Amino acid sequence: MNQSLWMMCLLLFAEGGSLSFLTTPTLLYYGKFHEAWLVGLLGSVASAAGSAVQLLLLRWALASRHPWMRRITPSREKVEAAVRLYPSASFMALLLARATPLPDAPLKLVAAVVEYSVSLYTLAVFLGALPYFYVLARLGREFRIPTWTLLAAAGLIALGFVVDRLRTRKRPPS
């Protein structure tokens, strides 16, 4: 696999703009080859940039009335449920959500619906990711997890995601 920081940034940009399920293995991998502070800093910048693009695309998808968008746009019920659960997509909530391995999709959805400032959103994601990414890169440096193990973990994460999606599709609406 490529050990270039440019490749890491490209991967984390794409991850930030998508489902973000390969971020942890990516940071553990690149942490083996580069200083943790550099991986954390550059990775946070790339991920925040990808997240900003994703926020803009999500806003566009939510605002569009095209029939072909209905399939990939969250249902109105899901948006309203997220807004009820997270009435304020505040800076600190976004920062703290990004500083943990927990999914931040509900807050991202709320931020898109309420048209939260893209620059504040990007800054919150960057600042939240910075310590988290540093710690993961540091763990990668200290433990030097074999690449095959990281690839297997990434495969299991992807498989878990697919199984979860298939399981929720088969579940009757409540």
Image (spheres, rainbow, N blue to C red):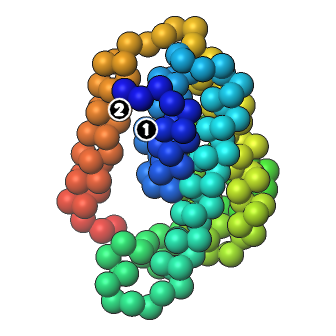
Q: Kindly identify which residue carries mark 2.
A: 154
Could you say which quadrant of the image residue 85 lies in? Answer: bottom right
Q: Is residue 173 above or below residue 50?
A: below
User: What label does residue 166 carry, if any?
Assistant: none
Look at the numbered discs 2 and 1 and tell me whether their residues touch, using CB distance below 8 Å: yes
Sort mark 2 into few (<14), some (14-19) or many (20+) by Cα contacts within 10 Å.
some
- Amino acid, disc 2: Ala
Q: In which quarter of the image is the C terminus?
A: bottom left
**Residue 102 spot, x, y in % from top left:** 55, 41
* Residue depicted at x 61% and y 46%: 46
What is the quadrant of residue 87 in the picture? bottom right
Cα distance in 3D space between marks 2 and 1: 6 Å
Q: Which residue is drawn at 44% across and 13% down?
A: 145
Residue at the disc numbered 1: 22
Give 78 or 30, whichever is nearer the viewer. 30
Quadrant location, the N terminus = top left
- Identified at 25% across, 61% down, the residue is 169
Residue drawn at 54 percent across, 38 percent down: 6
Q: Nearer the viewer, residue 143 or 49?
A: 49
Can residue 171 be seen here? The reply is: no
> Residue type at mark 1?
Leu
Q: Where is residue 133 in the image (x, y as percent from the top left)?
A: 63, 31
